[in-house]
Image (spheres, helix red, strand yellow):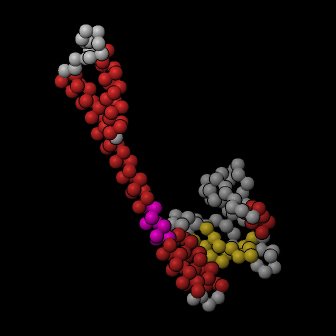
Amino acid sequence: DLNFAVMIGEVAVMLVLPQLPIHDSTIEAVVDASMLMAISTPVMYLLLRKSELDLEVANRQLEEHNAALKTRDADRILMEEMGEYMLATRDSAETYNIVARYIGRLLPGTSGGLYVLRHSRNSLEQAGVWGERHQSEPWFAPEECWSFRRGKRHQVNDAETDLACTHVNPRGDMAY
């Protein structure tokens, strides 16, 4: 910040210097105290204001970073807890139930379903759900799901323009 202040001061002096009276055609300038005060006051104000803004930005970034760390830590704790329960399950139905419950806690405000491909590989069966707005059938054929067919995530933001899966029953303008 000191270099910044020196640079602003030099620019201000270069702007003011031609206005000052020159003695005997030399480069000696007569600078009075009021001229220096006129130059230094705005420079100091700008430096203080810049420092305040830099501090505000740094504080905001620190708050965002702390919030992200808290969320990550809470997610880690939930994942560890889920893992402990999964290790203690007696069968796959309990495991699916645990996964669905914890996904709902890890992704608050979302709805969805956990589906398992049957051994016959001809249908996916609902093994668990979370959230209040789950909108898929309890079972469906793999070819009814764009995500399953393509082997990657499929998102629908607008059911009228995007390719919708036939196993999903969208309600209104709900995206999935």
**Dividing the image into 4 quarters, which one contains the N terminus?**
top left
Is residue 64 inside the magenta stretch? no
In this figure, what is the number of numbered marks?
0
Which residue shows up at 61% across the image and 73% down it? 129
Quadrant hosting residue 32: top left
Can see residue 81? yes
| Relative to 163, residue 75 above or below | below
In this image, 138 relative to 15: left or right? right
In this image, 39 relative to 142: left or right? left
Query: Which secondary structure dominates the residues rendered in magenta?
Result: helix
* Residue 6 or residue 106, whichever sits in front: 6
| Relative to 173, residue 11 above or below | above
Image position, residue 33 (x, y; %): 18, 24
User: Magenta region: which residues?
Assistant: 67-75
* Residue lying at the far left of the rendered structure: 33
Quadrant hosting residue 172: bottom right
Image position, residue 114 (x, y; %): 65, 73
Can see residue 50? no
* Residue 43 or residue 22, whichever sits in front: 22
Which residue shows up at 43% across the image and 66% down it? 70
* Residue lying at the far top of the rendered structure: 24
**Dividing the image into 4 quarters, which one contains the C terminus?**
bottom right
Image position, residue 51 (x, y; %): 32, 43
Which residue shows up at 78% across the image and 81% down it? 119
| Relative to 102, residue 65 above or below | above
Which residue shows up at 32% across the image and 24% down it? 12
In this image, 141 relative to 14: left or right? right
Image position, residue 71 (x, y; %): 46, 66
